[in-house]
Image: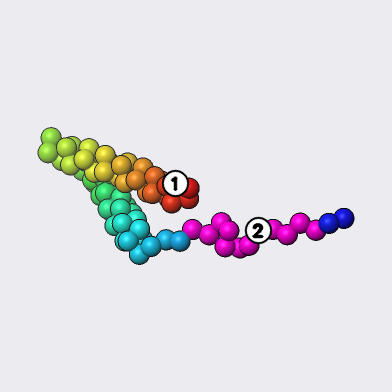
Amino acid sequence: MSEVTPPGSNALATTVSSHFKMIFIIIAVVTVACGIGNFWMAMGIADPTDSQRDVMATMSTIWKMGFGSMVGLVGAKAT
């Protein structure tokens, strides 16, 4: 029986530049901040005004877009 050697450990390695890390961290911070802010406003304000509803809708959109951006960045880096 012949032995099959697995590819080198670096065959599947992906290098991540400092520029990529910086962008990813900024997007992650903004996403988490908007998600927490949206949750805080939704739980803390019993009867929001129109302006407060607009802010909550904007924060909701931003955290959804941020999550999609993070998934996209990681997916693009993996290929």
Disc 2 target residue: 7
- Label 1 SS: helix
Please report whichever mark, 2 or 1, sits nearer to the chain's N-terminal start: 2
> Does the stretch in magenta take in 8?
yes
For the residue pair 61 and 53, the one nearer the viewer reads as 61
Q: Amino acid at mark 1?
A: Gly
Indicate the quadrant where residue 64 lies.
Answer: top left
x, y percent for residue 11: 58, 58
Residue 21 is marked as: none
Disc 1 target residue: 75
For the residue pair 14 and 51, the one nearer the viewer reads as 14
Q: Amino acid at mark 2?
A: Pro
**Magenta-tinted stretch:** 3-14
Proximity of marks 2 and 1: CB atoms separated by less than 8 Å: no
- Residue sitting farthest toward the front: 2
Residue at position x 30%, y 50% in the image:
31
* Residue 78 relative to residue 67: left or right: right
